[in-house]
Amino acid sequence: MKLLRWSVAPILVLLAVLSSCQRFQGLPPAPTATQIPAVRPSPTTLNPSTPTPTRQPEKQTVTPTPLAPHSPAQKEAVRPEAEDDLASLSDLTRYDIDVTIDYDNLTFEGRQVVDYTNTERTPLDKINFRLFPNGQKAYGNGSLIVTGVTIDGERVDTALSLNDTVLEVRLPAILKPSESVRLTLRFRGAVPRDFGESGASSTGSGQSRSGYGIYNFADNVMALSGWYPILAVFDDEGWNLDPTSAVGDSVYSDAAFYTVDIAVRDNLTVVATGVSIGQETLNGTTHFQYVSGPARDFFIVCSPDFQTITDSVGGVTVNSYYLPGHEAGGESALVIAMDALRTLNQRFGPYPYVELDVVEAPMRNAAGVEYPGVILIGDFLYDNHRNPFFETATAHEVAHQWWYNVVGSDVIDEPWLDEALVTYSSSVYFEDTQGPDAAQQTLDSWEQAYDRAVEEGADDLITKPLAFWEQPDHQRHYGTIVYLKGALFFQAVRQEIGDEAFFTALRNYYAANKYAIGTPEELLNAFEDAAGRQLDNLYEEWLHSVRS
Ligand SMILES: [Zn+2]
């Protein structure tokens, strides 16, 4: 997630270093703002039992037959030129979820059917899900509880660990490579109010001080990150079961297909990953049917207060949702996101989805956070949307659609792989929208911030894992080293091998790792392949050395 989720200190640092550079571009004619219907004062009680849509019978436990690649509806979520991608992704996990959100009581209940194929070389006797809100930290002090897991209609044994953030599901039969299993999980959750500082869900533990607002209710906005049990990643380390983090992002995940029925009271505007392909209102409750393309997560945010403006670029619908009084910021966000989509499409390869949503939300300890098809930008930035940091943060989160969503990475062990590349991508955005001088000013400001860190004796390796940066002595340097020094590394590579080889390498890395997990080795090899020579000295200087 990956935002600029740096602590407040680096945010202020960046505001300071950036405010004297970069001209904020004049805005084109404002799109027409659409007012969301007025808030109805009387809350609507939701029917406690979630209506169950028609489903295929839950039969096979383990089947050697590959699952159908995707529901035909998944095509609705991707651009026509990306439809061919879907056919080759029959092994991706499929989530089919019904969730009923009780906006008034800050709770929700859900049921999810998960079709999982063992794509590893190892037989599996268990599968691990993550329940991230229980880890608190960036999620505040709410909860996510699984109330039952069944396979083939039979309850299966489960075990919780790591502060209830890991749910181990013991399979009744060994799942061999290429075999599939269908699991059904029931769950419910409670969402913190006002970052956990008031309301029924507050535990008074103080743990929520590091909350970002990504799993939270504040100012009539309910943000639901990590609201469903998501599969952990099995890779060359085995199951990745790391604690949630107070810095950076906690979610390392494989791309999957999502079909989600979201039930909410009917005066809420719902924004979510993928696209809504239908909705129905009955007795004050609206059901939204969402489908996603291959996506690394499924995020939901809702409010009765959202206003929205919409435009499109290259066949992608871009929606900007903002809160009352922030019309100008909402318009700026739309323009920046469209410009970023246009330029990053050309530089790195096509954004494969039909929609991108930019959403204002109350946030702390983070300026923005990326989700598949949805980016959150902190409300405090809309207060002064002409500050260049608003533009930097928005372009940054858009760039995460390339480096995090389409091309995943291990954000726990290698946070630099997406954050440094995304930060550099935001300078490419400035280069293409405002000219090379604007990009150079940005790079200069990053270099100055990094030089100050060196003078303080705070230089470090950009390649260190999140656990290192979470330590109190290192937290305040996370943004400067991983984001800024990391971006300067990519600039050094570009200067060394030239524009053509540099962008060819990034396009090749993007295409080769689409909907998969990229690694540092693959990225570094891509530069060497495109340059036609080894870059050992450069890599040694930037990735394995510390200045003093
Ligand atoms: Zn980021």
Image (cartoon, grey):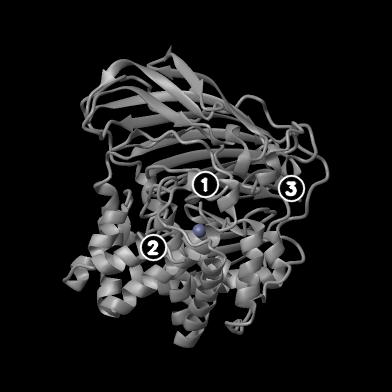
Pointer 2 with pointer 1, Cβ within 8 A: no
Amino acid type at image mark 3: Ala
Amino acid type at image mark 1: Gly
Q: Report x, y in % for residue 431.
A: 45, 81
Mark 2 or 3, nearer chain start: 3
In three-dimensional space, the C-alpha distance between marks 2 and 1, rounded to whole angstroms, equals 23 Å
Q: Quadrant of residue 217?
A: top right
Comparing 136 with 148, the one in front is 136
Q: How many residues crowd mark 3 within 10 Å: few (<14), some (14–19), many (20+)?
A: some
Q: Left or right? Give the position of 242 relative to 262.
A: left
Nearest to the eye among marks 2 and 1: give it: 2
User: Which residue is drawn at the image coordinates 50% and 50% (left, top)?
Assistant: 273
Assign a secondary structure to mark 2: loop
Nearest to the eye among marks 1 and 3: give it: 3
Q: Is residue 324 visible?
A: yes
Extreme-front residue of the structure: 548
Q: Left or right? Give the position of 419 relative to 19.
A: left
Label 1 C-beta lies within 8 Å of the nearest ligand 1 atom: no
Query: Which residue does the numbered mark 3 point to in the structure image?
Result: 218
Query: Which residue does the numbered mark 1 point to in the structure image?
Result: 278
Extreme-left residue of the structure: 532
Amino acid type at image mark 2: Tyr
187 shown above or below 342: above
Query: Which residue does the numbered mark 2 point to in the structure image?
Result: 351
Assign a secondary structure to mark 3: strand
